[in-house]
Image: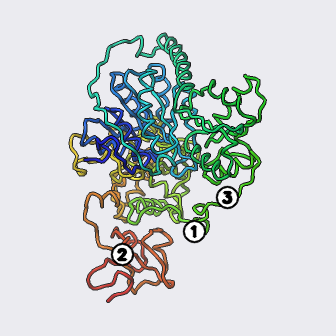
Amino acid sequence: MHKLLTDEPGKKMLLLGNEAIARGAVEAGVALAAAYPGTPSSEISLNFFQMARESELYFEYSVNEKVSLEVAAAAANTGLRSMCVMKHVGMNVAADALMTLAYVGVKGGLVILVADDPSMFSSQNEQDSRYYAKLSGLAMLEPSTIEEAREMTVQAFELSEELEEPVLLRTTTRINHSTAVVTLAAITPPKTKGEFVRNPMRYVTVPAVSRRLHQRLLENIGKAEDIANRSPLNIVEGSGDWGIICNGVSYTYVVDAVRDLGIKEQVTVLRLGFSHPLPEQLVNTFLDGCDHVLIVEEGEGIIEEGVKAVAQEAGKLLPIGGKSETLFSRLGEYNPALVREKIAAWFMVKDTAGQLPAEQAGEDLPPRPPTLCAGCSHRASFYAVKEAARNMDVVYPTDIGCYTLGMLPPLGMADFLICMGSSTGTAAGFSKALDKKVISFCGDSTFFHSAMAGLVNAVFNKHNFTLIILDNGTTAMTGHQPHPGVDMEKMGLSGFGRIDIEEVVRALGVGYLNVIKPFKLKKSIEVLKEAFAFEGVSVVIAREICTLYGRSLKIPEMKAFYVSKSCKNHKDCIDRLGCPAFFVEKGRVNIDPDRCTGCALCAQVCPENAIRPVTGKNSPMGGEK
């Protein structure tokens, strides 16, 4: 049985933040969940996917975030408790549905989990999703600890049903990917079949209906603010006249800083767990007891803006600090030492704690840039494209996925990237604006997510570029989640359809379509040259299973390769491919047999055929026996 299905109230369990959120949803009786995977939220959907095999929960990996929200919204309007999970940039994709869903509302609880990524550990931008709460007029909760992540998930469902609106549950990477002991509560059995009562004047958002629904939404915002003012999720601690207002994980840093600075008796802390709408009455009362206040919030100064507005309207003249050149930045993730330093500076106390050991530990470590895995077929695809396009003036739009790492040397196969699915749209623009060959890249999951629409546009408008679809049979970067093109039977799962990318592309009417096996280098280069010479939209599908995914499916691996004595040490294998299985020892190139997957790409690149498969007659570490 999946550990998150353990129905033992009071049992303590060590959980990742994302596991705690998934557990909270189960305790709340979630019946349907939908997601498109995106770090730092991916483990939530993974746990739902696993639990759905053993419980009444229905879970799906939807084609993109907009679709996942639409699926969850429909279920919630039949009375089922539903959840939609995404990362911050996914909220941009779902926003079209979100804005009008706020008007329509829900019958059953609908929680929308959005995971922000300060410092961009795995994202193309820093984005503060609290703005979506303001933009949509929906309530937002923000946990500060892993235990709260579980508790607030349950409370978010209850609040959603009380307001008859979706509720946003916002986390950040530090909450999603930290681990702590969580106390389990009882599991509520889900209601799995709903009822929908037709009511076009509520659910069909033509202008006449939406005008009335907008008024309803504004009334609901007032109701939500009244709840926020009384909510136990907003806590006040201490009794000093130095005020600190904070949210999310910043609260835990504040608590540590106040203790370390020895100013507990002088400080009162307001932690906003129910952060939108801003509980203005609570904030106003809090300000009455303070002579100066500091706002500690990662990302944008949203709380600061609201608190200053409350203070101004009440005629309060106390100093309120937050975002500035000398205090907190709008950039990046905060940490305990930074928060302590800024609190000390604002309240003019001495910071004697110094740097924490954990912060000193990584100072002298060498950088470790991300790289494509040993045996990754994308490396072969990029090399083949580079060879086929030799002496051509090329621009390479790319997309979101493992293959984005193709930007790094020695491959250098990425010139422009905006967002998920942008490869095809930007390729179209470049093809019209430049007298260059345009070659764009997208992955299989990305193709289904949103790149397909750009390809349709390109065929209709007769653009001129080549699209390389890197089909490795999974959503690799976020942890091997399925997408519509995955053969689910290989995962031992039945009851799923399968969409063939080749058939889809052919149906769209592209002028040139071919499929390559990228590890067959010579043939791949020949096909790519044909595609590049074609006038119009050409598509090449590079089909080869992700090496890590293949390993998880127990697909037999090929023999590792080694560098024989005939090697003249040109280092072409390293300089042109950059495979992490290579290493240099005493000036000579070697291959780590434990990392080599036997893809044979390097053997096809070596000018003197010095790279050979390991057999019983030779040594894997560089010399024949």
Label 2: which secondary element:
loop
Q: Which residue is mark 3?
A: 353
Q: CA distance from mark 1 to mark 2?
A: 26 Å
Quadrant where the C terminus sits is: bottom left
Pick the front one: 614 or 500: 614
2 or 3: tag closer to the N-terminus? 3
x and y, in percent, of residue 28 in the image: 36, 33
Residue in the image at 47% along x and 12% along y: 209
Q: Which residue is mark 1?
A: 365
| Residue 383, picture quadrant | bottom left
Q: Check disc 2 and give the amino acid type.
A: Pro
Badge 2: few (under 14), some or many (20 or more) residues near its Cα, within 10 Å? some
Q: Residue furthest bottom?
A: 625
Q: Confirm whether residue 178 shows in the render.
A: yes
Q: Nearer the viewer, mark 1 or mark 2?
A: 1
| Residue 318, picture quadrant | top right
Q: Check disc 1 and give the amino acid type.
A: Leu
Q: Check disc 3 and give the amino acid type.
A: Ala
Q: CA distance from mark 2 to mark 3?
A: 47 Å
